[in-house]
Image (spheres, rainbow, N blue to C red):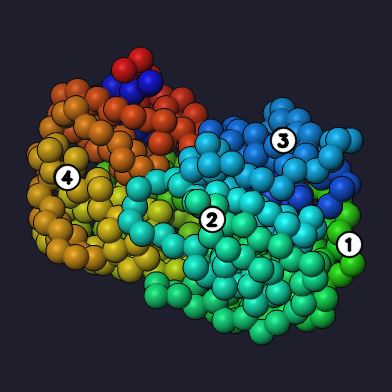
Amino acid sequence: MDKFVVYQSSLKGEVKVSGSKNATLPIMAATLLTDEECKIIGVPDLADVRTMIKILDILGKEVIFEGGVLIIKRKPKKWGYVAPYRLVRTMRASFCVLGPLLARRKKAKVSFPGGCIIGVRPVDLHIKGLRELGAQLNIERGYCVGEAKKLRGAHIFLGGAFGSSVLATDNTLMAATLAEGETTIEYAACEPEVVDLALFLKKMGADIEGEGTHLIRVRGVKSLGGAEFKVIPDRIEAGTFIAVALATGSSLTISGINPLHLTAVIETAKKIGANITVSDSKIHIDVFKKLSPTNITTLPYPGFPTDLQAQFMVALCLAEGISLVNEKIYPDRFMHVSELNRMGARIQRSGPYAIIEGNRNLVGAEVMASDLRASAALVIAGLVAKGKTEILRIYHLDRGYEKLDEKLKILGAKIKREKS
């Protein structure tokens, strides 16, 4: 098992963002809706992508992955319909094979998902959406087992306790493409990754409108074909580098992005103290002054992303004053707080709130990564802390960031990967 050893660093230069993990994985699942070849471009080489390749292999797909390009086609042998626990337990997005399997193969047995430990993340909205399309679903020994002899369009409300669900929208949307008649998904997730999936499905021949809004309409078609598609840049990786620039006081250019996907993040960074210049596919950040405290509330898109809460919390630990973080997506997503406090941060947790008393006295320590985004936050903290920081269990980070340590080294970071 690997760990990172990080020292206080000054950074400068340009970094290019990889393709979006959260867009790639549902798009990979969507290839189960066709027998024809699909080509996906701009795919990041991540542990989660490799896991999804293994799942598709079990489900009857031949996958070639080289140079950021996925070629996915059907194997000549019999289809599979079981996504096993040993793979699905490692990442939540793998549950997205459920909808395509039911729509195309009429049956499915998919393990309940795993992934990062960031609080309760039920799959009730996935099951609700698919049941309303006509699927018969039961929970058996940790698996969601279902049949769908005939899916029919329906009016489906997908609002949950914490707003819309990206992956439940994805699952329902994919199944609806092959359902008979029209489906309306109300309170659909608006995230760019959902839009990207819809655009891929359209290239396959799906009839969809309204993606990017809370009301998506799908008119079912008899079959879908192959497609070639390039995934969007990873807005969470881009936001992570914005947090890096803030915390380290660096001058960075972040390229290969879509700034329109980062509006809330950019505005928050400006409030904290960044001077940001935006162009078509890149942003330039300078941090000339002391950081200012601010309040952050995580919300569904286009609000501030929950996936950047931990990284920006590091910057708030360095701001002069009191900041408040209100986590409205995953109220228990504060596993990083105790580790940051071990490095000298002053953070108090109260339910879905974190109260941060800013200071500039972070000190290197041995810390444990608990989840993907917390791992990135600890790396940022290590870059500003005095002395040596050792970050254990960085396999979490490898699930969602392509060669993060190498990208940081190019910018001047003192970071190395070692065996734990």
Q: Nearer the viewer, residue 189 or 94?
A: 94
Helix, strand or loop at disc 4?
helix
Q: Quick check: 205 above or below 20?
A: below
Query: Does 202 sit left or right of 184 as displayed?
Result: right
Residue at label 2?
140
Q: CA distance from mark 2 to mark 1?
A: 30 Å
Q: Earlier in the sequence, mark 4 or mark 3?
A: 3
- In which image quadrant can residue 393 be found? top left
Q: Is residue 370 left or right of residue 363?
A: right
Which residue is the extreme one toward the top?
419
**Mark with earlier residue (1, 4):** 1
Q: Which residue is located at x 55 percent, y 52 percent?
A: 143
Which of discs 4 and 3 lies nearer the camera? The answer is 3
Q: Would you place residue 365 above or below residue 311 in this image?
A: above
Which three-letter amino acid code belongs to the residue tagged 4? Answer: Ser
How far is disc 1 from disc 3 in space, using C-alphas? 22 Å
Could you say where residue 83 lies in the image, as x and y percent from the top left? 63, 44
Tell me the element at label 3. Answer: helix
* Along the line of sight, the residue nearer the viewer: 347 or 121: 121
Disc 3 residue crowd, few under 14, some 14–19, many 20+, Cα 10 Å: some
Instruction: Write down the residue under mark 3.
Output: 57
Q: Amino acid at mark 3?
A: Asp
Could you tell me the amino acid type at mark 2? Glu
Mark 2 to mark 4: distance in Å? 36 Å
Look at the image and tell me in which quarter the C terminus lies.
Answer: top left
- The x and y percentages for residue 413 are 35, 26
Q: Which residue is mark 4?
A: 338
Q: Position of residue 301 (x, y in %)?
A: 48, 68
Q: Are marks 2 and 4 in contact (CB under 8 Å)?
A: no
Q: Which mark is residue 223?
A: 1
Residue 198 in the image, given as x and y percentages of width and height: 71, 64
